[in-house]
Amino acid sequence: MKKLLLALLLAGGAYAAYWLVVLQPPVRAYRQFADAWAREDTPAAVALTTGDAAKRDAESRILRGVVLEPMEAFRGSRNAIESREGFADGTVLITAKQFVHFDPPGITSGIGGAGVAEVRHVARMKKTPGGWRVVEWKVEFLEARPTRPGR
């Protein structure tokens, strides 16, 4: 019984290490990129890219140009990873939905935002000497809706 428990603990530890060292770094880098993009911190978002196409997309596809809803104040964002796919060339394709909380003009919510916009990101990540970077990125506006229906 003790040997079985030890084997399970070792297997769990090995999986946790694999998850932290192999699976999570590209996802963490993507989350940093998406957060910088949502805050409209273009220099920070561009710093997390590599290659001319990705840099150009990060500079030209700013949040307020993608979200087809007027925004007065940014109130934060969160990401939901929909899929993560690894390829033989070492790249990782991440598909995620980002929820951007905001206040439309004339409404001040203080916390959380009076509206939420959903945006889908498809980002190809590549490990570089400087860490994981976005090499290809597409963003698509899905919808915007109030967070407090009936108001």
Image (spheres, helix red, strand yellow):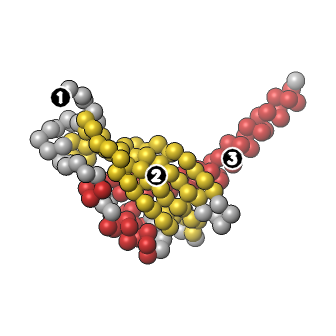
Look at the image and tell me whether residue 77 can be seen. Answer: no
Q: Amino acid at mark 2?
A: Arg
> Residue 151, image x and y in percent?
17, 28
Q: Residues within 10 Å of mark 3 (few under 14, many from 20)?
A: few
Q: Residue furthest top?
A: 1
Mark 2 or mark 3, which has the lower sequence index? 3
The residue that label 1 is drawn on is 151
Mark 1 or mark 2, which has the lower sequence index? 2
**Mark 1 and mark 2 residues within 8 Å of each other at the beta carbon:** no
> Residue 54, image x and y in percent?
44, 69
Q: Residue at x 61, y 53 (%)?
A: 85
Question: Mark 1: which secondary structure?
Answer: loop
Q: Nearer the viewer, residue 133 or 53?
A: 53
Which one is closest to the eye, mark 1 or mark 2?
A: 1
Q: Amino acid at mark 1?
A: Arg
The residue that label 2 is drawn on is 31
Q: Amino acid at mark 3?
A: Ala
Which one is closest to the eye, mark 2 or mark 3?
A: 2
Question: Mark 3: which secondary structure?
Answer: helix
Q: CA distance from mark 1 to mark 3?
A: 47 Å
Q: Nearer the viewer, residue 13 or 23?
A: 23
Q: With respect to residue 109, does 26 lie above or below?
A: below
> Residue 14, image x and y in percent?
74, 44
Q: Residue furthest left?
A: 106
> Residue 3, image x and y in percent?
88, 30
Question: Mark 2: which secondary structure?
Answer: helix
Q: CA distance from mark 1 to mark 2?
A: 32 Å
The image quarter containing residue 66 is bottom left
The residue that label 3 is drawn on is 17
Q: Nearer the viewer, residue 22 or 151?
A: 151
Q: Residues within 10 Å of mark 2 (few under 14, many from 20)?
A: some
Q: How many numbered tags mark residues here?
A: 3
